[in-house]
Image (cartoon, rainbow, N blue to C red):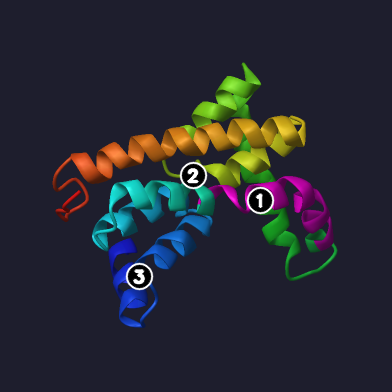
Amino acid sequence: MIEQFAKTLEQSGIPKELIVFIISLMPILEIRGGLIAAAVLQVRLSVALPICILGNILPIPFILLFIKKILRLFKKTKLLAPLAIKIEQKAEKQSKRVTRGKEVGLLLFVGIPLPGTGGWTGALVADFLGIRIKHSFIIITLGVVLAGVIMSVLTYFVPGLFGFSINI
């Protein structure tokens, strides 16, 4: 899916680095998707990793600052209330995995690239756990860097893992 999406954007004339950045900004895909796209588009790792980290981290302060307000607004509308409830339930469920040793748990939750983890969900979990915004941002940033290192190894150094081969 990421490969097809990246190739489609590339065919529309968007620079490879911008494609990688955009994919890294997106919830669910985040740095994992950005690095896979970078490898597919044959962007050098030394260029791709900083772009992906920046793209993944950029939305986090906004999520940390505004998520409660946004969810409250969503709950006031008939159309968006179910989405707000679903987001809160996901954050609550994920926060149960993190509660012991909140900071280390949050770091590992964001840093270990598994489905349903990452910076976006980590910001929701941090808010749900009541971790201060500044502290949360630092932990989530470190988690994104950890995820970037893990995904760099998996994407660029394990040949054929994602079904394509690349040159570093």
Q: Secondary structure at mark 2?
A: loop
State the CA–CA distance, disc 2 to disc 1. Answer: 12 Å
In front of the other: label 3 or label 2? 3
- Give me the residue at 44% from left, 66% from top: 18
Which numbered dot is residue 116?
2
Q: Amino acid at mark 3?
A: Phe
Q: Earlier in the sequence, mark 2 or mark 1?
A: 1
- Local secondary structure at mark 1: helix
Task: List the single residue furthest toward the bottom.
Answer: 12
The residue labelled by disc 3 is 5
Q: Is residue 91 visible?
A: yes
Between the residue at mark 3 and the residue at mark 1, the CA separation in whole angstroms equals 25 Å
Q: CA distance from mark 3 to mark 2?
A: 20 Å
Q: Which mark is residue 87?
A: 1
Q: Position of residue 84 (x, y in %)?
A: 72, 56
Q: Residue 70 colored magenta? A: yes
Question: Along the line of sight, which residue is nearer the eye, 149 or 95?
Answer: 149
Residue 57 x, y percent position in the rendering: 57, 47
Q: Badge 1 local density, few (<14 within 10 Å), some, or many (20+)?
A: some
Amino acid type at mark 2: Gly
* Image position of 83 with respect to 150: above or below: below
Residue 168 on image: x %, y %: 20, 48
Query: Residue 158, image x and y in percent?
Result: 18, 40
Q: Residue at 48% of width from left, 64% of height from top? A: 22
The magenta region covers 56-73
Earlier in the chain: of badge 3 and badge 2, it is 3
> Label 3's element?
helix
Amino acid tagged 1: Ile
Q: Main secondary structure of the magenta part?
A: helix
